Image (cartoon, helix red, strand yellow):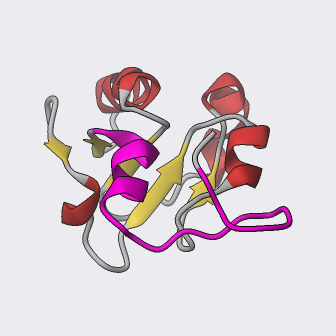
Amino acid sequence: MQNQVVTPAEVPEGAHLIDVREQNEWDAGHAPTATHLAASGLLEKLDELPEDGDLYIVCRSGGRSAQVTQWLNGNGYDAINVVGGMDLWFESGLPMVSDGEGEPYVL
């Protein structure tokens, strides 16, 4: 799989959505079904990635997720970049939750 991309609205229900943003970004707001594996520590946590199905990789705007997607695809994973990231996710009105107080937002 090479350089496949989807918009946030195209992420299938029940997909393995991996949020690669840092902890403070995650805490501010994230997709309710996402798994948090920050790009900065991903290599140490590869064993936490689902082994079946495509991995949909999301960050704030799509840059970090593109890099992570490219690396994962080069190392035998089936990864798809979510273009526009959580910025577009939020703008599209898709559901979000936060780990802090108040309404979720994109940091």
- Identify the residue at image location x=38%, y=70%: 94
- Identify the residue at image location x=49%, y=36%: 60
* Residue 86 among magenta residues: yes
- Identify the residue at image location x=71%, y=64%: 98
Magenta span dominant secondary structure: loop
In this rendering, the count of numbered labels is 0
Residue 106's place in the image compared with 42, above or below, is below
Q: Quadrant of residue 62?
A: top left
Left or right of 18 in this view: 53:
left
Along the viewing direction, whichever of 90 and 41 lies nearer the viewer: 90
Q: Quadrant of residue 44?
A: top right
Along the viewing direction, whichever of 53 and 88 lies nearer the viewer: 88
Along the viewing direction, whichever of 36 and 105 lies nearer the viewer: 105
* Residue 41 among magenta residues: no
Q: Quadrant of residue 99?
A: bottom right
The x, y position of residue 96, in whole percent, is 55, 68
The x, y position of residue 41, in whole percent, is 72, 28
Instruction: Farthest residue to the bottom: give it.
Output: 13
Q: Quadrant of the C terminus?
A: top right
Q: Quadrant of the N terminus?
A: top left
Left or right of 51 in this view: 107:
right
Q: Read off the magenta span.
A: 84-105
The x, y position of residue 95, in whole percent, is 47, 74
Residue 52's place in the image compared with 70, above or below, is below
Residue 39's place in the image compared with 97, above or below, is above
Instruction: Farthest residue to the right: give it.
Output: 101
- Identify the residue at image location x=57%, y=73%: 32
Left or right of 78 in this view: 94:
right
The x, y position of residue 100, in whole percent, is 84, 62
Along the viewing direction, whichever of 3 and 73 lies nearer the viewer: 3
Left or right of 6 in this view: 21:
right
